[in-house]
Image (tube, rainbow, N blue to C red):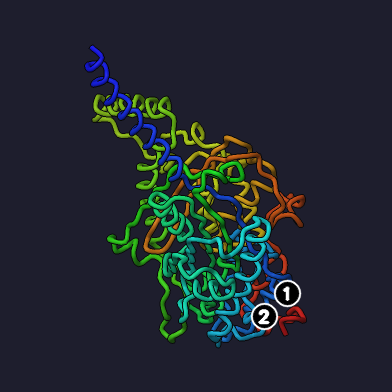
Amino acid sequence: MELIYLLYLVPTLYACFLIWKMLDERRDRECYILNYQCYKPPNDRMLGTEFCGKLIRRTENLGPSEYRFLLKAIVSSGIGEQTYAPRNIFEGREATPTLRDSIGEMEEFFHDSIGKLLAKSNVSPSEIDVLVVNISMLATVPSLSSRIINHYKMRHDVKVYNLTGMGCSASLISMDIVKCIFKTQRNKLALLITSESLSPNWYTGSDRSMILANCLFRSGGCAILLTNKRSLKDKAMLRLKCLVRTHHGAREEAYGCCTQQEDDQGRLGFHLGKTLPKAATRAFVDNLRVIAPKILPIRELLRFLFVSTIKKINKSSNAPKSVASTGATKSPLNFRTGVDHFCLHTGGKAVIDGIGMSLDLSEYDLEPARMTLHRFGNTSASSLWYVLSYMEAKKRLKKGDTVFMISFGAGFKCNSCLWEVMKDLGEANVWDDCIDEYPPESLANPFMEAYGWINEVDDPYTYEHLPEFLK
């Protein structure tokens, strides 16, 4: 009898051990954000209304029709007067950027934000095990990641990933790389750097599809410290719950809607095509189709299944009848049943409005993205973290809340992820000096007041009331 008992006991104990080991290992595969630091350039790089007027005036390739187009684009962009640009723009060398300008722009961000992040996290550069850098439109030799390693004297065995060409969605692509590393390697610290180089990519031609990028993209960046160390769980700000990447590069219209290219005169710029809204919508829908079952409660999925079934039955029974389309693109799923906060890519006012309509979001949900676009502009891949900083500065993020991040990028890509807030957040960040001013009473751009006369004259150069700073 004892032998039989042992024969049952040993396999049972072994099975329990395997289950415990599996669950224990899973705890070491989590991806936590310990801290992050958004970059705020100095005030001498701020693009005010007057300087923007001078910048447009000195661009020799622009005529009256381009002036009117720019005025309309800037006024409707949702961007304010306190965004930032590279130094060569202020020095009048936007048409002749140098490699030193590009590297200097990046190093200014690296030295400021990485240093602040490591200092407030009490982490030494030698403790970093993984370094992931994404700067889409700048590739140097040595690489930008090598420049970081050299400046901060990181270890010789640090694992390095240097990404280019990933566009505005590169931040979550880098996050996915870190997540995959954390699944196979225990007790690691990762440093993720995300930004964009505008110095060599400021367009000085007259192609409207490329001028538009000048109205939207601004300087910025973010450094993020991540870990899968179980011992640091209590210090973590956020925990990654799931991440989904969608890539429509196989579709020609999606592939070609956002490209870095030269115009007919050989001037380099970033082209935003007319098929961009359609490509973004398709990628967004496909991405939501995958991530929705991962983040929404079962009751909402069952409700959706029930409603969809009823609609199909009614549609089949009323087949002869034609119903006029309203053109609405609202999702049939209620994402607010599984999400507390929405961290949206600040690709422009139209992008924010489109996502808001698709997910049926309130103005409260859209406020962080709108205010970030107004204050910092579209800072490319780092824009999500300025939006998150706004939520934190407003003390919206409480322990147990969930944050849904959505980003779009050239290629064409749509990436999204869901974070769980690990503790009440409200630390000092990049918004500290102006958070009390947001949201302002009006987001109206002062460009119309300053330059609205352009729409009323045939030739702006002969306008008798031309402001002094434009003469």
Crowding at dot 2, Cα within 10 Å, few <14 / some 14-19 / many 20+, comes out as some
- Whether 194 is drawn above or below 24: the answer is below
Q: In the depicted view, which residue is nearer to us: 381 or 25?
A: 25
Q: Is residue 308 visible?
A: yes
Q: Is residue 165 above or below residue 353?
A: below
* Residue 462 sits in quarter: bottom right
Which one is nearer the viewer's eye here, 70 or 37?
37
Q: Please report the residue visible at 69 percent of the width from the left and 42 percent of the height from the top.
A: 395
| Residue 32 locus on image (x, y percent) | 52, 47
Direction from residue 29 to residue 231 in the image, left or right: right
How far across and down, in percent of the image, does residue 155 sit?
Answer: 51, 68
| Visible residue check, residue 448 | no
Q: Position of residue 316 (x, y in %)?
A: 24, 28
Q: Amino acid at mark 2?
A: Phe
Q: Are marks 2 and 1 in contact (CB under 8 Å)?
A: yes
Name the residue carrying label 2: 90
Q: Amino acid at mark 1?
A: Asp
Residue occupied by mark 1: 44
Q: Residue at 70% across / 76% down in the picture?
A: 51
Q: Check residue 133 in the rendering and tell me which mark sits there, or answer none.
A: none
Residue at 44% across / 86% down in the picture?
265
Q: Quadrant of residue 42?
A: bottom right
- Report how many numbered discs are placed on residues in the image: 2
